[in-house]
Amino acid sequence: MATKCLIVDDEEHNRYLLDVLLRGYGYETMTAENGADALKKVRPNPPDLIISDIMMPVMDGFHFCRECKTDPLLKDIPFVFYTAHYTERRDEELALALGADRFIIKPQEPERFMAMMKEVLEFPRSREETERPLLDREAYLSAHSERIVRKLEAKMADMAKMNLALRESEEKYRLLAENIQDVIFVLDLDLDYIYVSPSVKLLRGYEPAEVMGSKVAETLTPASWEVVAKIISEEVEREKTGSVDRQRSRIMDLEMLHRDGTTVWTEVKVSLLRDERHRPTAVLGVTRDITERRQAAADLEKSLFRLRKVLEATVQAIAMTVEARDPYTAGHQRRVADLARAIAVEMQLDDDRIDGLTMAATIHDIGKISIPAELLTTPRKLTDIECNLINTHAQSGYEILKDIEFPWPIARMVREHHERMDGSGYPRGLTGADLLLESRIMSVADVVESMATHRPYRPSLGIDTALEEITRNRGTFYDPRAVDACLRLFHDRGYRITA
């Protein structure tokens, strides 16, 4: 039959831990919240072992132990004190004088604790010990009162220290809140201000008293309120599904209304305050003025836009220089760039990569500057030596561009536009895994445009032949995704190569 154990502790968490531990070792358990509750349970159904805390309401552990040891039906039940608050030698002496079998200080390793319980059960107190006279009532009350008074005095001293520390902490936070430039605020769950720091006057021109009780929506521009409303909706949904991270903060850039009619850009960081059951009770936030930062970012964006335009104009000038030497392929780079961009859009590349690819495609033949013009424009079929010379243009283009600090790997794209997925291309014989995706897209666009338009040494082969080429060699020479996107453009999107 399983050993029956009574666990007595006013802390639910402590009862739960002991209950799980004892059951794990095969014990049968019952629990009580204090000594009075325990007596009601043990008298009709005595256990084999009692484990009790000391500091409990209604009836503490010392009183409970004395009641057990003076009751003929309960006095022989092994009694163990397990306490975190009564840790002095005099506490243990009182416990043993009351008849307890063991006095154990919390916490203990589970294995060690269970070993102690086994010892108590296997080696109970001797007859001499169990029959030793217990403290009489007067001695017990005196000792017990002395223990209680001492504990209360210690608690009062601790509380005095805590109160002093709390006052000092509150003073520090008050000074911080009143002097910090950032605005600290608290909202109730209806998004009404219930606290705002004095720095709100610096930020928005209002006194704190004027802000108190107002709603967040009244302090924001309509566009910013839409942002807040969306985030609130998301957070409400997370609360419903239980997927919310209770430590999570949200940071938003919001445009707030100033008293003088202007607006102020702010960075607002908010988090939910919760009760002991993790239910939201309020919103805590910090607001920082980022107007200057936003203006600096806007100015930088304008500068980058101007630089981008200058760069694009420079690249166009280079492209025109290349094409001026080769009138038969005039517009080739532009058409390749247009098709490459369309393929990249179809493949849903991000805008920045598409811009880089377009710029590289616009000057992908820049290396032909190093090729004699008469070789580029000759109407006859080229010799192997002449073909090899023309094939150097990809590497030559790389050498021209490699030291220019483009925001994209332009030089590398130019060098790789004649490479093939299976390594049969030039100038380096790279395979698909080593090639930029942009280079693979440009390769498809270059082949389709070249075959579909006129060349000095042959007439146009037609768009059908060009599309048949990339279809036949899909995955061998050409990237499958780029091929599929190109085919969709012509078959489904109505794309056409213009002169």
Image (tube, rainbow, N blue to C red):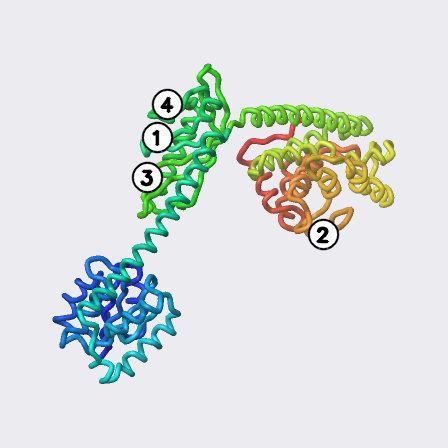
Secondary structure type for disc 1? strand
Residue 194 disc label: 1
Q: Earlier in the sequence, mark 2 or mark 4?
A: 4
Disc 2 designates what residue? 423
Q: Give residue 120's quadrant in the image.
A: bottom left
Q: Are marks 2 and 1 in contact (CB under 8 Å)?
A: no
Q: Which is closer to the viewer, label 2 or label 4?
A: 4
Task: Tell me the kind of residue under disc 2.
Answer: Gly
User: 370 and 5: which one is in front?
Assistant: 5
User: 405 and 114: which one is in front?
Assistant: 114
Task: Tell me the kind of residue under disc 3.
Answer: Thr
Secondary structure type for disc 3? strand
Task: Tell me the kind of residue under disc 4.
Answer: Ala
Q: Are marks 3 and 2 in contact (CB under 8 Å)?
A: no
Q: Quadrant of the N terminus?
A: bottom left
Q: Residues within 10 Å of mark 3 (few under 14, many from 20)?
A: few
User: 494 and 321: which one is in front?
Assistant: 321
